[in-house]
Image (cartoon, rainbow, N blue to C red):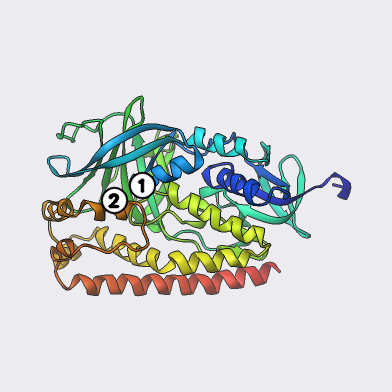
Amino acid sequence: MSEKSIERFDVVIVGAGLAGTSLAYHLSEACPDKRVLILDKNEIGANCKHSNRIVAQDTKDAVAEYGLRTVYRHKGVKLGTFNEIYATLDGGVYVIDFKDTCSSFFKKSSAEFRKEKAVALKKDKILVTDKAAYQYSFLIDCSATSFFLRKQLGLSLPFRYWIGVKKYSSPDECSVPIDRRYYYNLMEENNLYLYEYLYNGQALSYCKWQNAFSKDIETVTNKEGQRGYRLRRIKEPFVEQKDFVGFPGNPLLPLVVGNCAFLGDSAGTTPPQSGFGVDMSLKCAKMLTDALSKNDLDYYQKTWKRTFYQHYLRHLAARIDRSSISPALQKLKNYPGLDKVCAAVQKNPDSYFSLIRNNMDFSVPKEVKECFPSRRALFLLYHYAEIRARYLRSRITDSLSILKRH
């Protein structure tokens, strides 16, 4: 391919989901002179397996700021199990249409879009696709769980995932009547699964979630030749690929390598405490835009780590602690039942909404802390130390991979 046939862009974005399109929008606002290209093998917003995403209570500010179209507003939240509701919290929870949101951001931007698949990185800041080649000043990976750039650079992939099964019907085991006016968080007593119910303006959908280690997720093919997933160490039935939803459950560092950066699910920035990633994607897109306007990607990583890093690690430690699948360990921990925890949360509803808003100043209410035995602090400390050790090992192996590539 001749040099004349290579188009040049200031910023090339791989991935046309929420992260990529919102970044393009912010760049058009802050840096209108930069030439921006978005690449995706599919159409804009097509990477979401379910067309609607939940937006937490105070995202009404973000909805107003960006002019997002909401398809439904739940009047509150119900917490409990399949058999009983333990708490009802008042407060709006918004649902947006994912594809519509991505399209809206793109239309408001001045970015160009090409339906092409990113294939490889070459020297001299060249990105090769299945149809062309582009030279960039900055390359931003918003490829979500495709992890295009991380795989190209040989960097570490997530050790933790949010995984779920998305359906548009209620499971037979649910005996609680579902009122579509409310958003439901239903949990099993052993904390293995979280069931999410929401109404998207057309149908009631539910998703069965688990926050699991990547080593426990197995890719399999059943007798009919269908590809899908199964969880190791748990008697979990085969899940067809079309019904499977998954995204990283831990931050992926580094966020910046040279003149390349990661944003959205490819950076693992979905908060571990809630799984509500829309608001955080918008915040991180703004943060990265500030760095690109300064032509200094390191500013993005430094700002993110200073603002969010410790917050993420603390909540990730708590998530891992709650998701233990060992019956012996659960017995040793002897944590309270959901009825006691939900009753304490109902006395402090703002704490729940603060949690799912991903507020950095969130703190567990005194009534909730008092539900747990004091030894929980030791388990949290252990998980926190283990997470830090994982990041140290990843930092060493990633540094070696980058040096080897150069």
Looking at the image, residue 364 lies above or below residue 235: below
Looking at the image, residue 45 lies above or below residue 372: above
Residue 37 horizontal side relative to residue 364, left or right: right
Estimate the spatial distance between the alpha carbons at disc 2 and disc 1, rounded to whole Å.
8 Å
Residue designated by label 2: 353
Which amino acid type is marked by label 2? Phe
Q: Is residue 221 or residue 20 the one in the foreground?
A: 20
Q: How many numbered circles does the render carry?
A: 2
Image x and y of residue 148, in percent = 60, 52
Earlier-in-chain disc, 2 versus 1: 1
Looking at the image, residue 150 lies above or below residue 210: below
Quarter of the figure with residue 201: top left
**Residue at 32 percent of width and 40 percent of height:** 93
Image x and y of residue 44, in percent = 58, 36
Under circle 1, the secondary element is helix
Q: Residues within 10 Å of mark 2 (few under 14, many from 20)?
A: many
Which amino acid type is marked by label 1? Asp
Under circle 2, the secondary element is helix
**Residue at 26 percent of width and 48 percent of height:** 193
Mark 2 touching mark 1, by CB under 8 A? yes
Location of the C terminus (image quadrant): bottom right
- Note whether residue 183 is visible: no
- Front label number (2 vs 1): 1
Residue designated by label 1: 58
Residue 288 horizontal side relative to residue 130, left or right: left
The numbered disc on residue 68 is none
Image x and y of residue 327, in percent = 18, 60
Image x and y of residue 263, in percent = 54, 54
